[in-house]
Image: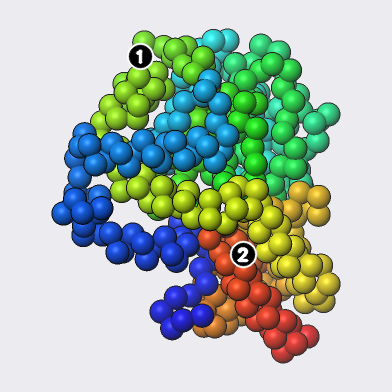
Protein backbone atom coordinates (compact mmCIF):
# COMPACT_ATOMS: atom_id res chain seq x y z
CA UNK A 1 0.00 0.00 0.00
CA UNK A 2 1.48 3.33 -1.08
CA UNK A 3 1.82 6.28 1.26
CA UNK A 4 -0.86 8.28 -0.48
CA UNK A 5 -3.52 5.60 -0.98
CA UNK A 6 -5.47 4.03 1.88
CA UNK A 7 -7.92 1.15 1.94
CA UNK A 8 -11.29 2.87 1.99
CA UNK A 9 -14.03 0.58 3.33
CA UNK A 10 -16.74 3.27 3.09
CA UNK A 11 -20.30 2.18 2.32
CA UNK A 12 -20.50 5.00 -0.20
CA UNK A 13 -19.25 7.05 -1.86
CA UNK A 14 -16.73 4.27 -2.13
CA UNK A 15 -13.34 3.73 -3.69
CA UNK A 16 -12.91 3.57 -7.44
CA UNK A 17 -10.40 1.33 -9.29
CA UNK A 18 -6.99 3.00 -9.17
CA UNK A 19 -6.33 2.45 -12.87
CA UNK A 20 -9.65 4.16 -13.66
CA UNK A 21 -8.69 7.17 -11.56
CA UNK A 22 -5.29 7.30 -13.24
CA UNK A 23 -6.82 7.14 -16.71
CA UNK A 24 -9.29 9.89 -15.80
CA UNK A 25 -6.44 12.00 -14.44
CA UNK A 26 -4.50 11.53 -17.66
CA UNK A 27 -7.48 12.67 -19.71
CA UNK A 28 -8.64 15.38 -17.33
CA UNK A 29 -7.57 18.43 -19.31
CA UNK A 30 -7.62 17.01 -22.84
CA UNK A 31 -9.93 14.12 -23.66
CA UNK A 32 -9.09 12.21 -26.84
CA UNK A 33 -7.33 15.13 -28.49
CA UNK A 34 -10.42 17.33 -28.18
CA UNK A 35 -8.45 20.03 -26.38
CA UNK A 36 -10.85 20.10 -23.45
CA UNK A 37 -12.00 18.11 -20.44
CA UNK A 38 -15.15 15.98 -20.50
CA UNK A 39 -16.25 18.31 -17.67
CA UNK A 40 -16.28 21.19 -20.14
CA UNK A 41 -18.03 19.54 -23.07
CA UNK A 42 -21.46 20.36 -24.34
CA UNK A 43 -23.71 17.35 -23.86
CA UNK A 44 -24.93 18.08 -27.40
CA UNK A 45 -21.45 17.82 -28.91
CA UNK A 46 -20.42 14.96 -31.19
CA UNK A 47 -17.51 14.09 -28.88
CA UNK A 48 -19.74 13.65 -25.85
CA UNK A 49 -22.43 11.87 -27.85
CA UNK A 50 -19.82 9.26 -28.79
CA UNK A 51 -18.92 8.81 -25.12
CA UNK A 52 -22.59 8.55 -24.18
CA UNK A 53 -23.45 6.02 -26.87
CA UNK A 54 -20.45 3.82 -26.05
CA UNK A 55 -21.20 3.81 -22.31
CA UNK A 56 -24.82 2.89 -22.94
CA UNK A 57 -23.82 0.12 -25.35
CA UNK A 58 -21.20 -1.24 -22.93
CA UNK A 59 -23.69 -1.25 -20.06
CA UNK A 60 -26.30 -3.02 -22.20
CA UNK A 61 -23.81 -5.68 -23.25
CA UNK A 62 -22.28 -6.27 -19.82
CA UNK A 63 -25.63 -6.42 -18.02
CA UNK A 64 -27.38 -8.32 -20.81
CA UNK A 65 -30.13 -5.72 -21.08
CA UNK A 66 -32.78 -6.87 -23.59
CA UNK A 67 -34.13 -4.61 -26.33
CA UNK A 68 -37.41 -4.33 -24.40
CA UNK A 69 -35.66 -2.27 -21.73
CA UNK A 70 -34.30 1.26 -21.89
CA UNK A 71 -31.19 2.47 -20.04
CA UNK A 72 -31.52 5.91 -18.47
CA UNK A 73 -28.75 8.04 -16.95
CA UNK A 74 -30.52 10.24 -14.39
CA UNK A 75 -29.76 12.45 -11.40
CA UNK A 76 -31.17 12.73 -7.88
CA UNK A 77 -29.61 9.55 -6.53
CA UNK A 78 -31.42 6.39 -5.60
CA UNK A 79 -33.50 8.47 -3.19
CA UNK A 80 -35.25 10.31 -6.03
CA UNK A 81 -36.30 6.93 -7.42
CA UNK A 82 -38.18 6.34 -4.15
CA UNK A 83 -40.67 8.93 -5.44
CA UNK A 84 -40.24 8.58 -9.19
CA UNK A 85 -41.18 4.88 -9.18
CA UNK A 86 -44.60 5.19 -7.50
CA UNK A 87 -45.26 8.47 -9.26
CA UNK A 88 -44.90 6.78 -12.65
CA UNK A 89 -46.09 3.24 -11.95
CA UNK A 90 -48.73 3.21 -9.24
CA UNK A 91 -51.41 4.93 -11.31
CA UNK A 92 -52.30 1.65 -12.99
CA UNK A 93 -54.00 0.21 -9.88
CA UNK A 94 -53.20 2.67 -7.10
CA UNK A 95 -51.49 -0.13 -5.17
CA UNK A 96 -47.92 -1.31 -4.64
CA UNK A 97 -46.24 -3.90 -2.41
CA UNK A 98 -42.89 -3.48 -0.63
CA UNK A 99 -40.48 -5.87 1.09
CA UNK A 100 -38.78 -4.01 3.93
CA UNK A 101 -35.39 -5.60 4.62
CA UNK A 102 -33.39 -2.57 5.68
CA UNK A 103 -33.16 1.19 5.91
CA UNK A 104 -33.45 2.11 2.25
CA UNK A 105 -36.40 -0.11 1.39
CA UNK A 106 -38.14 1.34 4.46
CA UNK A 107 -37.48 4.89 3.26
CA UNK A 108 -38.69 3.93 -0.22
CA UNK A 109 -41.93 2.55 1.21
CA UNK A 110 -42.53 5.68 3.30
CA UNK A 111 -42.10 7.83 0.20
CA UNK A 112 -44.42 5.61 -1.84
CA UNK A 113 -47.20 6.03 0.73
CA UNK A 114 -47.58 9.60 -0.52
CA UNK A 115 -48.84 8.23 -3.85
CA UNK A 116 -51.17 5.33 -3.10
CA UNK A 117 -52.11 2.19 -1.18
CA UNK A 118 -48.82 0.65 -0.03
CA UNK A 119 -48.73 -2.83 1.50
CA UNK A 120 -45.83 -4.36 3.41
CA UNK A 121 -45.36 -7.64 1.57
CA UNK A 122 -42.67 -8.78 4.03
CA UNK A 123 -40.42 -7.33 6.71
CA UNK A 124 -37.30 -8.46 8.54
CA UNK A 125 -37.59 -5.73 11.16
CA UNK A 126 -38.54 -8.26 13.87
CA UNK A 127 -34.90 -9.44 14.02
CA UNK A 128 -33.28 -6.09 13.19
CA UNK A 129 -32.98 -6.98 9.51
CA UNK A 130 -30.47 -9.78 10.05
CA UNK A 131 -32.27 -12.06 7.56
CA UNK A 132 -34.13 -12.04 4.22
CA UNK A 133 -37.75 -13.29 4.19
CA UNK A 134 -38.28 -16.45 2.15
CA UNK A 135 -40.45 -16.60 -0.97
CA UNK A 136 -43.32 -18.25 0.93
CA UNK A 137 -43.38 -15.32 3.38
CA UNK A 138 -43.97 -12.74 0.63
CA UNK A 139 -47.54 -11.42 0.61
CA UNK A 140 -47.95 -9.97 -2.89
CA UNK A 141 -51.34 -8.67 -4.03
CA UNK A 142 -52.43 -9.74 -7.52
CA UNK A 143 -53.53 -6.19 -8.34
CA UNK A 144 -50.37 -4.48 -7.14
CA UNK A 145 -48.88 -2.17 -9.78
CA UNK A 146 -45.44 -3.45 -8.79
CA UNK A 147 -43.47 -5.28 -6.08
CA UNK A 148 -40.41 -3.48 -4.69
CA UNK A 149 -37.33 -4.75 -2.91
CA UNK A 150 -33.71 -3.70 -2.25
CA UNK A 151 -31.31 -6.44 -3.33
CA UNK A 152 -28.45 -5.62 -0.96
CA UNK A 153 -28.79 -3.91 2.41
CA UNK A 154 -25.67 -1.85 3.06
CA UNK A 155 -26.39 -1.00 6.69
CA UNK A 156 -27.37 -4.46 7.90
CA UNK A 157 -25.09 -6.53 5.66
CA UNK A 158 -27.68 -8.79 4.04
CA UNK A 159 -28.22 -9.67 0.38
CA UNK A 160 -31.15 -11.40 -1.29
CA UNK A 161 -30.10 -14.90 -2.32
CA UNK A 162 -33.00 -15.34 -4.73
CA UNK A 163 -35.14 -13.33 -7.16
CA UNK A 164 -38.71 -13.01 -5.84
CA UNK A 165 -41.48 -14.66 -7.84
CA UNK A 166 -44.31 -12.17 -8.20
CA UNK A 167 -46.90 -13.96 -10.31
CA UNK A 168 -46.84 -11.40 -13.08
CA UNK A 169 -46.67 -8.29 -10.88
CA UNK A 170 -43.82 -6.10 -12.25
CA UNK A 171 -40.62 -6.47 -10.24
CA UNK A 172 -38.83 -3.29 -9.15
CA UNK A 173 -35.41 -3.49 -7.52
CA UNK A 174 -32.87 -1.14 -5.95
CA UNK A 175 -29.45 -2.60 -6.85
CA UNK A 176 -27.43 0.42 -5.76
CA UNK A 177 -24.91 -1.53 -3.70
CA UNK A 178 -24.39 -4.71 -5.69
CA UNK A 179 -24.92 -3.83 -9.35
CA UNK A 180 -22.13 -5.12 -11.66
CA UNK A 181 -21.13 -7.66 -8.98
CA UNK A 182 -23.21 -10.63 -10.17
CA UNK A 183 -25.07 -11.72 -13.31
CA UNK A 184 -28.68 -10.52 -13.43
CA UNK A 185 -31.55 -11.69 -15.65
CA UNK A 186 -32.72 -8.18 -16.51
CA UNK A 187 -35.77 -9.54 -18.38
CA UNK A 188 -37.31 -10.46 -15.00
CA UNK A 189 -37.42 -6.83 -13.91
CA UNK A 190 -39.82 -4.03 -14.72
CA UNK A 191 -37.31 -1.58 -13.27
CA UNK A 192 -33.91 -2.02 -11.73
CA UNK A 193 -31.87 0.97 -10.71
CA UNK A 194 -28.72 1.95 -8.88
CA UNK A 195 -27.04 5.02 -7.50
CA UNK A 196 -23.55 5.05 -8.97
CA UNK A 197 -21.38 5.81 -5.95
CA UNK A 198 -20.79 2.27 -4.72
CA UNK A 199 -19.89 0.14 -7.76
CA UNK A 200 -20.09 2.34 -10.84
CA UNK A 201 -18.94 5.98 -10.68
CA UNK A 202 -18.78 9.05 -8.43
CA UNK A 203 -21.97 10.23 -6.72
CA UNK A 204 -24.36 12.18 -8.92
CA UNK A 205 -25.43 9.56 -11.47
CA UNK A 206 -28.30 7.10 -11.16
CA UNK A 207 -28.73 4.35 -13.76
CA UNK A 208 -32.31 3.18 -14.34
CA UNK A 209 -33.14 0.18 -16.52
CA UNK A 210 -36.84 0.14 -17.33
CA UNK A 211 -39.12 -2.09 -19.36
CA UNK A 212 -40.44 0.44 -21.85
CA UNK A 213 -44.00 -0.81 -21.55
CA UNK A 214 -44.15 0.42 -17.93
CA UNK A 215 -43.71 4.03 -19.01
CA UNK A 216 -46.84 6.00 -19.85
CA UNK A 217 -48.98 5.29 -16.77
CA UNK A 218 -48.03 8.49 -14.99
CA UNK A 219 -50.68 11.14 -14.13
CA UNK A 220 -50.70 14.38 -16.11
CA UNK A 221 -49.47 16.23 -13.04
CA UNK A 222 -46.14 14.35 -13.08
CA UNK A 223 -43.29 16.88 -13.37
CA UNK A 224 -41.52 16.65 -16.72
CA UNK A 225 -38.17 15.87 -15.10
CA UNK A 226 -39.69 13.01 -13.09
CA UNK A 227 -41.44 11.37 -16.02
CA UNK A 228 -39.82 8.17 -17.31
CA UNK A 229 -41.51 8.63 -20.67
CA UNK A 230 -39.83 12.03 -21.10
CA UNK A 231 -36.43 10.59 -20.28
CA UNK A 232 -36.93 7.65 -22.64
CA UNK A 233 -38.02 9.91 -25.50
CA UNK A 234 -35.10 12.30 -24.94
CA UNK A 235 -32.56 9.48 -24.25
CA UNK A 236 -31.75 10.95 -20.81
CA UNK A 237 -30.95 14.33 -22.37
CA UNK A 238 -34.06 16.40 -21.71
CA UNK A 239 -31.67 18.53 -19.69
CA UNK A 240 -27.91 18.35 -19.16
CA UNK A 241 -27.12 14.87 -17.84
CA UNK A 242 -24.28 14.18 -15.35
CA UNK A 243 -21.78 14.11 -18.20
CA UNK A 244 -18.54 13.51 -16.31
CA UNK A 245 -20.04 10.73 -14.22
CA UNK A 246 -21.32 9.01 -17.35
CA UNK A 247 -17.77 9.17 -18.72
CA UNK A 248 -16.45 7.75 -15.43
CA UNK A 249 -19.00 4.93 -15.61
CA UNK A 250 -17.65 4.15 -19.06
CA UNK A 251 -14.12 3.78 -17.69
CA UNK A 252 -15.38 1.52 -14.89
CA UNK A 253 -17.31 -0.66 -17.38
CA UNK A 254 -14.11 -1.15 -19.43
CA UNK A 255 -12.31 -2.05 -16.20
CA UNK A 256 -15.03 -4.60 -15.32
CA UNK A 257 -14.58 -6.17 -18.75
CA UNK A 258 -10.87 -6.53 -18.06
CA UNK A 259 -11.65 -8.38 -14.82
CA UNK A 260 -13.63 -11.01 -16.72
CA UNK A 261 -16.92 -9.17 -16.96
CA UNK A 262 -19.70 -9.45 -14.40
CA UNK A 263 -19.15 -13.19 -13.93
CA UNK A 264 -15.52 -12.37 -13.17
CA UNK A 265 -16.57 -9.72 -10.66
CA UNK A 266 -18.89 -12.22 -8.97
CA UNK A 267 -16.07 -14.74 -8.56
CA UNK A 268 -13.78 -12.07 -7.12
CA UNK A 269 -16.48 -10.81 -4.75
CA UNK A 270 -17.10 -14.32 -3.45
CA UNK A 271 -13.38 -14.82 -2.88
CA UNK A 272 -12.96 -11.48 -1.08
CA UNK A 273 -16.03 -11.80 1.13
CA UNK A 274 -15.29 -15.48 1.75
CA UNK A 275 -11.83 -14.64 3.07
CA UNK A 276 -13.25 -12.12 5.53
CA UNK A 277 -16.26 -14.23 6.56
CA UNK A 278 -14.10 -17.33 7.09
CA UNK A 279 -11.86 -15.42 9.46
CA UNK A 280 -14.80 -13.87 11.33
CA UNK A 281 -16.53 -17.25 11.70
CA UNK A 282 -13.45 -18.65 13.46
CA UNK A 283 -12.66 -15.54 15.51
CA UNK A 284 -13.08 -15.52 19.29
CA UNK A 285 -13.02 -11.71 19.41
CA UNK A 286 -15.41 -10.76 16.60
CA UNK A 287 -18.98 -11.92 15.91
CA UNK A 288 -20.98 -11.68 12.68
CA UNK A 289 -24.26 -9.75 12.59
CA UNK A 290 -26.19 -11.16 9.59
CA UNK A 291 -27.52 -14.69 9.19
CA UNK A 292 -25.15 -16.94 7.25
CA UNK A 293 -27.31 -17.77 4.20
CA UNK A 294 -27.87 -14.12 3.29
CA UNK A 295 -24.63 -12.42 4.28
CA UNK A 296 -23.78 -9.69 1.82
CA UNK A 297 -20.76 -9.99 -0.46
CA UNK A 298 -20.56 -6.19 -0.49
CA UNK A 299 -21.04 -5.12 3.15
CA UNK A 300 -19.69 -7.28 5.96
CA UNK A 301 -21.11 -6.40 9.39
CA UNK A 302 -19.48 -7.59 12.61
CA UNK A 303 -18.88 -6.55 16.23
CA UNK A 304 -16.89 -7.44 19.35
CA UNK A 305 -19.87 -7.25 21.71
CA UNK A 306 -18.25 -4.38 23.59
CA UNK A 307 -18.96 -0.83 22.39
CA UNK A 308 -15.70 0.53 23.77
CA UNK A 309 -13.75 -2.26 22.08
CA UNK A 310 -15.57 -1.56 18.81
CA UNK A 311 -14.62 2.11 19.02
CA UNK A 312 -10.99 1.20 19.76
CA UNK A 313 -10.89 -1.15 16.79
CA UNK A 314 -12.24 1.49 14.38
CA UNK A 315 -9.77 4.08 15.70
CA UNK A 316 -6.75 1.79 15.50
CA UNK A 317 -7.81 0.53 12.07
CA UNK A 318 -7.96 4.09 10.73
CA UNK A 319 -4.53 4.84 12.11
CA UNK A 320 -3.29 1.75 10.26
CA UNK A 321 -4.76 2.91 6.92
CA UNK A 322 -8.18 1.22 6.97
CA UNK A 323 -10.87 3.92 6.94
CA UNK A 324 -14.64 4.01 7.42
CA UNK A 325 -14.97 0.72 9.31
CA UNK A 326 -17.32 2.06 11.98
CA UNK A 327 -20.75 0.42 11.68
CA UNK A 328 -24.01 2.27 11.20
CA UNK A 329 -25.73 3.31 14.43
CA UNK A 330 -28.64 0.96 13.62
CA UNK A 331 -26.35 -2.04 13.94
CA UNK A 332 -23.31 -0.79 15.84
CA UNK A 333 -20.00 -2.58 15.64
CA UNK A 334 -18.15 -2.46 12.35
CA UNK A 335 -18.87 -2.65 8.65
CA UNK A 336 -16.37 -3.41 5.90
CA UNK A 337 -17.72 -2.45 2.49
CA UNK A 338 -15.86 -4.43 -0.14
CA UNK A 339 -17.35 -3.32 -3.43
CA UNK A 340 -15.88 -4.23 -6.81
CA UNK A 341 -13.03 -1.72 -6.61
CA UNK A 342 -11.69 -2.97 -3.27
CA UNK A 343 -8.65 -5.08 -4.22
CA UNK A 344 -8.04 -8.51 -2.72
CA UNK A 345 -4.90 -7.06 -1.13
CA UNK A 346 -7.09 -4.69 0.89
CA UNK A 347 -9.15 -7.53 2.34
CA UNK A 348 -6.04 -9.60 3.09
CA UNK A 349 -4.44 -6.62 4.82
CA UNK A 350 -7.61 -6.02 6.86
CA UNK A 351 -7.76 -9.65 8.00
CA UNK A 352 -4.10 -9.50 9.01
CA UNK A 353 -4.79 -6.34 11.01
CA UNK A 354 -7.82 -7.95 12.66
CA UNK A 355 -5.80 -11.02 13.65
CA UNK A 356 -3.21 -8.76 15.26
CA UNK A 357 -5.95 -6.80 17.06
CA UNK A 358 -7.51 -10.01 18.29
CA UNK A 359 -4.18 -11.28 19.64
CA UNK A 360 -3.64 -8.01 21.51
CA UNK A 361 -7.20 -7.83 22.89
CA UNK A 362 -8.14 -11.26 24.13
Query: Residue at position x 82%, y 76% from top?
Result: 284
Residue 132's quadrant in the figure?
Answer: top right
Query: Residue at position x 65%, y 26% from top?
Result: 188
Label 2 belongs to which residue?
336
Number of numbered discs on residues: 2
Q: Secondary structure at mark 1?
A: loop
> Residue 159 location in percent, x, y?
69, 47
> Residue 112 location in percent, x, y?
53, 27
* Residue 256 sits above or below residue 216 on the image: below
- Label 1, label 2: how far apart the Cα atoms are: 43 Å
Residue 185's quadrant in the figure?
Answer: top right
Single out the mark in the foreground, 1 or 2: 2
Query: Residue at position x 60%, y 61% from top?
Result: 338
- Report whether residue 303 is seen: yes
Question: Is 216 displayed left or right of 295 in the figure?
Answer: left
* Residue 119 sits above or below residue 21 on the image: above
- Report whether residue 203 is seen: no
> Residue 299 location in percent, x, y?
63, 57
Q: Furthest-bottom residue in view?
A: 360
Q: Which numbered dot is residue 221?
A: 1
In the rendered view of the protein, which quadrant contains the C terminus? bottom right
Question: Is 345 displayed left or right of 194 in the figure?
Answer: right
Q: How does the figure colour the protein chain or chains?
A: rainbow
Circle 2 packing at 10 Å, graded few (<14), some (14-19), many (20+), is many
Residue 116's quadrant in the figure?
Answer: top right
* Residue placed most toward the observer, 194 or 362: 194
Q: Furthest-front residue in view?
A: 33
* Residue 332 sits above or below residue 208 on the image: below
Q: Secondary structure at mark 2?
A: strand
Amino acid sequence: MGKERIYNFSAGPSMLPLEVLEQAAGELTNYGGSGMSVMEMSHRSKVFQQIFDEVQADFRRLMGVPDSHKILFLQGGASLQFAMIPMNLIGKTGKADYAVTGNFSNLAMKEAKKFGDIHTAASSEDRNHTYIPRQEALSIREDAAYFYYCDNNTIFGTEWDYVPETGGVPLVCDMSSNILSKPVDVSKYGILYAGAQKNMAPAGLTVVVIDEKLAGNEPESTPTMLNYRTMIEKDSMYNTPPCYNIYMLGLVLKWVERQGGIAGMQAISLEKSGLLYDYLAESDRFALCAEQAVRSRMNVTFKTGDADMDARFAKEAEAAGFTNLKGHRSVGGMRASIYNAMPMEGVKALVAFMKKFETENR
